[in-house]
Image (cartoon, helix red, strand yellow):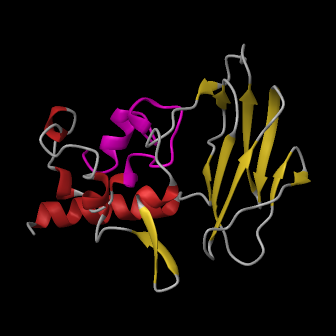
Amino acid sequence: MPHRSRSLVLCAALLFAQDEPNLLSPPNGASFASGPVRVIARAEGKPEITVDGKPIALESPVDGVATANLKLEPGAHVVGFGKESAKVFVGEGAPTEFKPFRFHPAMASCTSCHAVKNGVWAFQRPSLVTTCGQCHAKEKFPAKHTHEMGILADCQICHDPHGSTAAGHLRKQKDVACKQCHN
């Protein structure tokens, strides 16, 4: 691997690891026209997810993961997980501080990308490039990116794989995301 490529991978991996949340979805400020609201969290021990301060029943497909499908009444709610929280809105006429949530992948389940391997929740494929490449065509990639698909070992350095309120599921604005590694 050329020196520049190795630097980009290291740069992006360090930046991503610094602000990686445990509450993976929903993001703060998301609005949902209707339910259910899917909660996904990276968990250890006995996790507790709350809605408006009240604990909810969890599903745990495997140790280390907590999920729930919430059927919430219309209005604003706070989804909490440990020290993290996300304010969400359900129903029509969301206030301007809330943005429509876009699922990613649109109709997939957890097992579209993940599987239990040796008792641990992992990706089905050996890398995220091959996992994401199941749906995202390698040939179309250069139209929106300045590098090849495999230059970063982890697509989620820039994109949120569990859905978001941003175009392209970007974790940060495009100019900010690219400048993490490109001065």
- Is 73 magenta? The answer is no
Q: Residue furthest top?
A: 93
- Is 180 magenta? The answer is yes
Q: Residue at x 81, y 29 (%)?
A: 76
Q: Residue at x 51, y 57 (%)?
A: 110
Magenta stretch, main secondary structure class: loop
Describe residue 31's horizontal placement relative to residue 81 as left or right: left
For the N terminus, which image quadrant?
A: bottom left
In the image, residue 109 above or below residue 5: above
User: Residue 42's x, y, as percent?
Assistant: 61, 65
For the C terminus, which image quadrant?
A: top left
In the image, residue 166 above or below residue 95: below
Where on the picture, by quarter, is residue 169? Answer: top left
User: Residue 13's x, y, as percent?
Assistant: 36, 63
Q: State the residue in front, 78 or 182.
A: 78
Q: Residue furthest left?
A: 2
Count of numbered marks: 0
Q: Which residues are magenta?
A: 156-183
In the image, residue 15 above or below residue 136: below
Q: Residue at x 18, y 57 (%)?
A: 150
Describe residue 104's horizontal placement relative to residue 40 as left or right: left
Describe residue 30's horizontal placement relative to residue 45 as left or right: left
User: Residue 83's x, y, as percent?
Assistant: 76, 58
User: Residue 51's x, y, as percent?
Assistant: 84, 47
Q: Residue furthest bottom?
A: 118
